[in-house]
Image: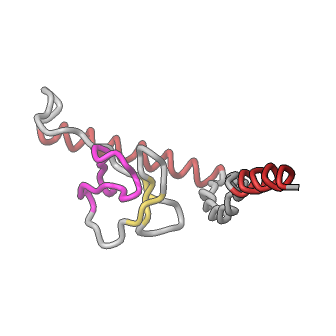
């Protein structure tokens, strides 16, 4: 009888030392919905393109009037943002095309989109 109890005790002790099975990972929280970018109608896109062309033309004319067209400027050229049609105080970031709130910032001022990770992406308010 002793010979039977000793091996059973060894098996019981060995089974107690076995690691527990791993617990399943807790479920991850649901992802927040990504806000949709506003879509433009054909008319709004045409207005946006016209605004960009007008701003570029005005910038060229201003440079010609100031005599800056003959040689390269020492300060870097920054693009001018285009206004969002129907939303005063909002512009499109010319690098990422995200909508940026520029209410209270004067025309021609240099700004940066706080959601754009590239610090060199500066642009002017129209």
Please give the name of the residue rendered at 70% of the width and 62% of the height, measured from the top-left corner: 27
> Which residue is nearer to you in this view: 85 or 120?
120
Q: Is residue 113 magenta?
A: yes
Indicate the position of residue 73 as horizontal and vertical percent values: 13, 34
Which residue reaches farthest top? 71
Camera-side residue: 122 or 67? 122
Range drawn in magenta: 107-126
Q: Position of residue 19 (x, y in %)?
A: 67, 53
Magenta stretch contains residue 61: no
Spot occupied by residue 14 in the image (x, y as percentages of width and height): 72, 51
Q: Is residue 106 left or right of residue 114?
A: left
Q: Is residue 36 above or below residue 53?
A: below
Is there any visible trace of residue 46 in the rendered image?
yes
Question: With respect to residue 9, does 72 lie above or below?
Answer: above
Q: State the count of labels.
A: 0
Q: Viewed as shown, does residue 50 lie left or right of 107?
A: right
**Residue at image coords 19%, 37%:** 64
Q: Nearer the viewer, residue 20 or 80?
A: 20
- Looking at the image, can residue 24 be seen? no
Q: Where does residue 97 sit, x and y in percent of width and height? A: 48, 49
Q: Residue at x 61, y 62 (%)?
A: 35
The image quadrant that residue 71 belongs to is: top left
| On-image quarter of the N terminus | bottom right
What secondary structure do most residues of the magenta stretch adopt? loop
Q: Which residue occupies 17% across, 31% down?
A: 69
């Amino acid at each position: 009888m002793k010979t039977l109890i000793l091996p059973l005790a060894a098996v019981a002790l060995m089974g107690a030392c076995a690691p527990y099975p791993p617990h399943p990972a807790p479920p991850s929280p649901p992802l927040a919905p990504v806000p949709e970018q506003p879509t433009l109608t054909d008319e709004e896109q045409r207005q946006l393109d016209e605004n960009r062309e007008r701003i570029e033309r005005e910038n060229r004319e201003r440079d010609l009037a100031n005599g800056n067209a003959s040689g390269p400027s020492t300060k870097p050229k920054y693009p001018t943002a285009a206004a969002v049609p129907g939303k005063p105080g909002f512009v499109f970031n010319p690098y990422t095309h995200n909508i940026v709130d520029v209410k209270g910032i004067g025309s021609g001022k240099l700004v940066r989109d706080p959601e754009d990770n590239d610090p060199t992406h500066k642009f002017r308010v129209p």
